[in-house]
Structures are given as C-alpha cells and as structure tokens.
Image (tube, grey):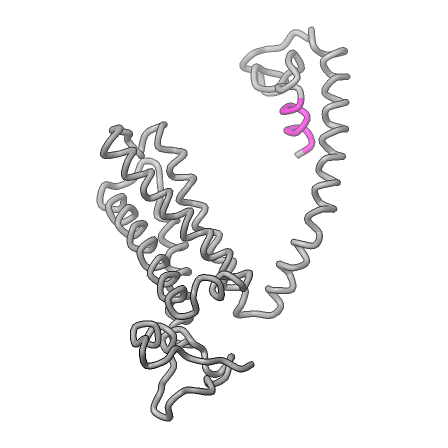
Amino acid sequence: QVTFEPGADKPWRRWCFRLVHDEDALGRPTNAPDNARYHGKAFERIIKFAIVLNVCLLMLWANPIDPFVLYVYETTNYLFVFVFTIEAAIKITAFSFREYIRPPWNKFDFFLVAFSLCASCASVLATTVFGIDLNGHLGISMRWLRCVRALRIVRLATVSTSLIKMIRTMVYAAPAICNITFGIFIFTAAYAQFGMAFLGTLLYDPNGAGFSRFAHFETATRAVSTLVRMST
C-alpha cells in the first residue's frame, strides 16, 4: 500500500501523521525522510489500554455509591471522553476527515466520540443549569448514555482475527435473528390473547408466588410479560 506523509509546509499535520501511522502494517511512506520515525503501533497500544481501563472503571458504579468512588467515576468519565476526542482529532488532522472516516472502525469510533461528547454536555447542563441529581431517578437516563461508551471495547476485536470473524458472523446473522425474534413475538402475542380470554377473570392472591399483581392475564402488556417470565 502506497502512502504519502504531509509535506514540510504542514508541520503540525506531519507530526500527527507520524504519531498515528503504523509503519509495520501500512509500510513506510514513499516521501518519508531517512530520519523519520513513526509511532502508530505504540499509539494504538495506548488507545487499546485506555479502552480496557475505561470499561473497567465503568464497573465502579454501585447504588448506593461512596462519595469518593463517585468522584473518581465522574472524573474519569470526562477524562476518557477527552482522551478519545483527542485521538479522533489527531487522526483527522493527520489523514483529513474524508480519509479518516473511510474505514468502518473509524466510523464506529467517530460515532462513539460524538455520542460521548453529547452525553457529557447533557450531563453538565443537567447538573449545572437544571439542577438534576444524576444519582437520583432523573439521572438514570444519563447513566445509560455513559454505558454506551462500553461498546468501544468491540474495537479490541482488531487484535484477534477470530474475534473479527465472530463479530462478522453476528452481523450477518442479525437479519435471521430479527426474523426469529419477530416470529416468537407473534406467537407470544397470540398466546397472550388466549390467556386473556380464558384466564383474564381468574382470581389470584396479589402477593402470591404464582399468579399475582405482577403476573396475570388481565391486560395485554401484563399477559405478554407473564408469558415471557414463564418461558424464561
């Protein structure tokens, strides 16, 4: 694969290119000086370590949570958003946005970076402007937004070809899985109607271990929920 590094008239872009370019995987640029050094492999190793650390720190959350642990959780959240934003900015500077966004993994990274930035801004606005307690009931949605960042660990699949094959298999099988899930839902809805017709007036103990206020056939939604509980 033929590559070219930015010229000497763009020193900042050239520095970013040498930082992220993997000479072993992509080859040495044809216009590279003899004394040029490229650190792409080390750069990717640092980013992969940051991904693993980020996912591990997401598991610090507990309810109730110690104030110091909460401080560490919140601080590292913004720190990793900053780190991955800088990574994307360096790569965009090195390759241009058009070239950066071309590989599928970079599309995935850019989506997560943009999503994380929006979630962080929403968290800051919620706490400072609207006075929402992120540890309360209204803050649950904000925590769900942060958990989306755990998808970044999928990027570690590039380390192993077998993991890449497994992910591709899951992607290719997704339409069939959706069809099977839809078929199961149709049968569940049909049986829920039968349950409402024959068991909808059944007397039960609201606090019982079998049929109760959480498992009955009086309403369609509760009937479907009851069948799912019975099947699992």
Residue 5 in the image, given as x and y percentages of width and height: 41, 79
Question: Looking at the picture, does residue 198 appear above or below residue 48?
Answer: above
Residue 33, located in which quarter of the rendered image? Answer: bottom left
Counting labels gives 0
Which residue is the extreme one toward the front? 9
Q: Residue at x 65, y 7 (%)?
A: 203
Q: Residue at x 55, y 60 (%)?
A: 104
Residue 127 in the image, given as x and y percentages of width and height: 26, 34
- Quadrant location of the C terminus in the rendered image: top right
Out of 201 and 91, give the one closest to the viewer: 91
Q: Residue at x 37, y 42 (%)?
A: 119
Question: Looking at the picture, does residue 2 appear above or below residue 123?
Answer: below
Q: Which residue is drawn at 39% across and 70% down?
A: 94
Residue 129 in the image, given as x and y percentages of width and height: 24, 31
Magenta span: helix, strand or loop, mainly? Answer: helix
Horizontal arrangement in the rendering, residue 64 relative to residue 22 (left or right): left
Q: Does the magenta stretch include residue 136?
A: no
Residue 163, located in which quarter of the rendered image? Answer: bottom right
Residue 165 in the image, given as x and y percentages of width and height: 65, 64
Horizontal arrangement in the rendering, residue 163 relative to residue 61 (left or right): right
Out of 38 and 190, give the one closest to the viewer: 38
Horizontal arrangement in the rendering, residue 36 relative to residue 30 (left or right): left
Question: Looking at the picture, does residue 83 appear above or below residue 131?
Answer: below
Give the magenta-colored segment's residue range.
224-231
- Quadrant location of the N terminus in the rendered image: bottom right
Out of 122 and 92, give the one closest to the viewer: 92
